Amino acid sequence: MLSAEGLRHSFGSVRALDGISFTLSAGRTLALFGPNGAGKTTLLKVLAGLIQPEAGRAVVEGGRAAVGWIGHQSHLYGHLTVRENLLFWATLYDVPRALRLRRADELLRRLGLADRADVQVRVLSRGLMQRATIARALIHDPRVLLLDEPFTGLDLSAAAEFRELLTELTGAGRIVVLATHNVDEGVELATDVAFQSRGRFVHFEPRGARGPSDIADAYRRTVASG
Amino acid sequence: MTLIQKGRVVSLVGLVLLGAVYVRALAFTPTEATQGLAQKIYYIHVPAAVWAETSMILIGLASIFFLFLGDPRLDRFAEASAQVGAVFAAVVLTTGPIWGKPIWGTWWTWDARLTLTLLLFFIYLGYLVMRGAVTDVGLRARYSAVLGICGLLLVPFIHFSVLMFRTLHPQPIVLKPSAPSLPGVMLVTLLLSFGVFTILYIGFVMQTYALALAHEAGSDG
Amino acid sequence: MGDVLRHAWVIARKDLLLEFRSRTAFLSAAVFTALVLTVFNFGRDPTAVATIDLAPSILWITFIFAAMLALNRAFQLELENQALEGLLVAPISRRSIYWAKLIANLMFVSVVEAIGLPLFVLFFNVPIGNVLVPLVGLIVLATVGFVAVGTLFSAMVIRTRFAELMLPVLLLPFLIPPLIGAVQVTAALFAGRPLSEVEGWLRLLAAFDMCFVTLATLLFPATVNE
């Protein structure tokens, strides 16, 4: 379970979060839309424990050990190979030794990195690096996924593969918060949809049966009405 | 009255009183037998040195409280204290040689007080330079607090190392240690000077603090 | 504490692997040490002052400057791809990060000193044979203090604009008390005087180490939290 209560945070005079509260139970996937500067990244950082909010609290069941994070940077070490990176993060997250190699191999295979496993990350193309980032985020089998525009840099087939992977992961009872400004990228995966603008949730509701175009319309209407 | 006006008043009072103390020092306090007129500088040198060190201690304490409470006023105070402390340290470092040259024939000597103040001066400069190099206000405050607390802890180490160094390599003592050996009149003048420097410290810090506050308000708005 | 050290070691090991892969930092530090010793040789008038009198100062100034160059690397490794953020999201104590960098820095600086000491003996003809053990002990004692404070400060300066210049400006005042101690004890050792004579300095160094390692451990989280 993941809950937020009255989150408020500013950077200097800029209000990044202005009173956000919500709850997500297991199996829910929240697609979080909003323009740049709406505070989506800040919200995710608070949920991940990177930022202590000025007011309010966020609780993630399982704490930081249960969180898988994909932000704007890969968190990969350029001079280590893909596999070495995965094993490092696995060790740091206290994944039992017996599981580490096996899970690493599996993720490498699943994300199409098996033949690049022993290549240093710094020579990878952007798309491959994003795939490696995804593997890194999943190596400790997190119950909660916080994804900040994770489709960036993925080509069509990789994006499709990632979407399939996400569908699998959410089906297993995980909680996913997916921030994006592209409606097509995340909507079909979502059980819930929220529009964030200027630090607040303008809407937070179940997606229902709506598709990307419906959501996009609703979003445009919200933005137009201020 | 606004803070900066109050600060100016306090500083002005302090400076006037400093003048008064000097009148007393020059006209009404006996001249020291061996050192002559140059010894009069003592009445600025010693209180300034004490306050240069006390500023650091206050910064350290304010920094500790800042890390627990997060109150930006503590950070602003620490910054003001660092600026004033640097000025007082500079006073010590200039009055020392002015005193030393006529008496010892050398401009500089590594005696305990000058060495301590020199190191404090470097820490103040580093503190202020670092503040200038960090743009994010929150980060700057946290970094300053860390540096301030480290500075506070370093002070006793400087004292001990300088003390031990001096027993091995005795340097000319720039100024006799204060208190018991001073005749009554001189002691009173010195104490008055301490009082004046306290007032000056408070006045200068008030002004600097108010300036920082105004600057922040200006840049936000 | 056990977890802190365990995680610290995982991170430190990764750092050493990265260091070994790219090697440039290490080679530069080693060459720098040799160069400084050479400069000292030509920067003095051998007829004016006996080498043995200057030797302790030469040794320690060389070590301090080589150490200062090396200190920034530790956190620079985490700047690439913002890996530091990954470390902050992970379920580890912030202190592990400090200890990891402290351990990695100590190992790096030790190796540089292990190269510098024989060169020093060679260039300046200093007979250290019978005081080798206490000398090495002293070097360890003093180095811990330098590196403890230096690691903390490098965590801060790494995010400022002139990190290479800022670190010495902030750090050198703090190194002066232990430096005085190190030079005094070294001078006593070279002159064949008993260690009991410099007991006060040894105590100062030990106290400095304990106080600043503790303080740095306590303060480090403040430098990375937002």
Image: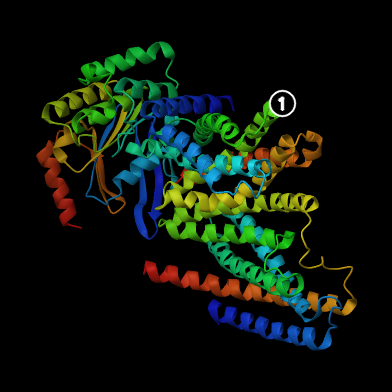
Camera-nearest residue between A209 and C50: C50
- Can see residue B152? yes
Q: Where is residue C108 in the image (x, y as percent from the top left)?
A: 50, 31
Image x and y of residue A152, in percent: 20, 37
Q: Is mark 1 on a helix, strand or loop?
A: helix
Q: Residue B67: in sight, yes or no? A: no
Q: What residue is disc 1 on?
A: C130
Q: Residue placed at 24% from the left, 31% from the top?
A: A130
**Tag count:** 1
Query: Is C169 rendered above or below residue A111?
Result: below
Residue B27 or residue C53, whichever sits in front: C53
**Horizontal side, residue C109 vs residue B107: left or right:** left
Looking at the picture, which amino acid does disc 1 mark?
A: Asn
Q: In this view, does B188 lie to the left or right of A105?
A: right
Looking at the figure, which quarter contains the N terminus of chain B?
A: bottom right
The percent coordinates of residue C177 (x first, y second) are 67, 48
The C terminus of chain B is located in which quarter?
bottom left
Q: Answer left or right for C8 relative to C90.
A: right
Rendered residue at 78%/34% (across/down) = C195
Q: In which quarter of the image is residue A158?
A: top left
Residue at the spot 58% in from the left edge and 63% down from the top edge: B82
Which of the two residues, B107 or C43, is positioned nearer the viewer here?
C43
Question: Which residue sits furthest left?
Answer: A213
Placement of B212 over or under C223, stated as above or below = below
Residue B196 image position (x, y, % from top left): 71, 77
For label 1, count other residues whose C-alpha is less than 10 Å away and answer few (under 14), some (14-19) or many (20+).
few
Q: Which chain carries label 1?
A: C
Q: Residue at (65%, 38%) from the top-left corner?
A: C209
